[in-house]
Amino acid sequence: MQGEEFKQLIYNLMLGEINLEEYPVKESLYIENEFCEGKICDTAYLEICTAKQKLCEKIGVYEDTDIESIIDNYEAICYHLCMKMFEYGVLFSEGNKE
């Protein structure tokens, strides 16, 4: 497995989106689920959900498209940065840059 498929696997492992009981992969021995209880991503995500709920309550709705857009676009930015960071890590580990 290489390239985009490998990057996506690593990303999904970090998000905890792979059921390792049904789909065990050797990379899971090295890649942590960053959304496990108590980890920084778990705590930050819970704070996002709480803030979203409070905002929706303030404006008197169950869900708001603008709030969802903010969250979705921030997730897109994070995804893009993660993929680029992976590519830069590969580039520098191969000795292509000093």
Image (cartoon, rainbow, N blue to C red):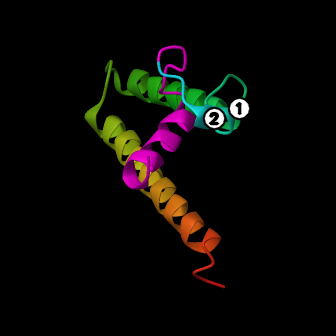
| Residue closest to the eye, 65 or 31 | 31
Is residue 1 left or right of 30 when viewed as pictured?
A: left
**In the image, residue 47 lies at what x, y percent?**
59, 30
Residue type, numbered disc 1: Lys
Is there any visible trace of residue 33 in the rendered image? Answer: no
- Res. 31 mark: none
**In the image, residue 61 lies at what x, y percent?**
31, 21
Is residue 16 left or right of 83 when viewed as pictured?
A: right
Secondary structure beneath dot 1 equals loop
Q: Is residue 4 above or below residue 58?
A: below
- Res. 34 mark: 2
- Determine whether label 1 and label 2 are within 8 Å by CB: yes
Residue type, numbered disc 2: Glu
**In the image, residue 15 lies at what x, y percent?**
53, 34
Is residue 78 left or right of 14 when viewed as pictured?
A: left
Could you tell me which residue is drawn at 54 percent across and 34 percent down? 13
Magenta range is 1-22
> In this rendering, which labeled residue sits more in front, label 1 or label 2?
2
For label 1, the residue is: 39
Which quadrant holds residue 8? top left
Is there any visible trace of residue 45 in the rendered image? Answer: yes
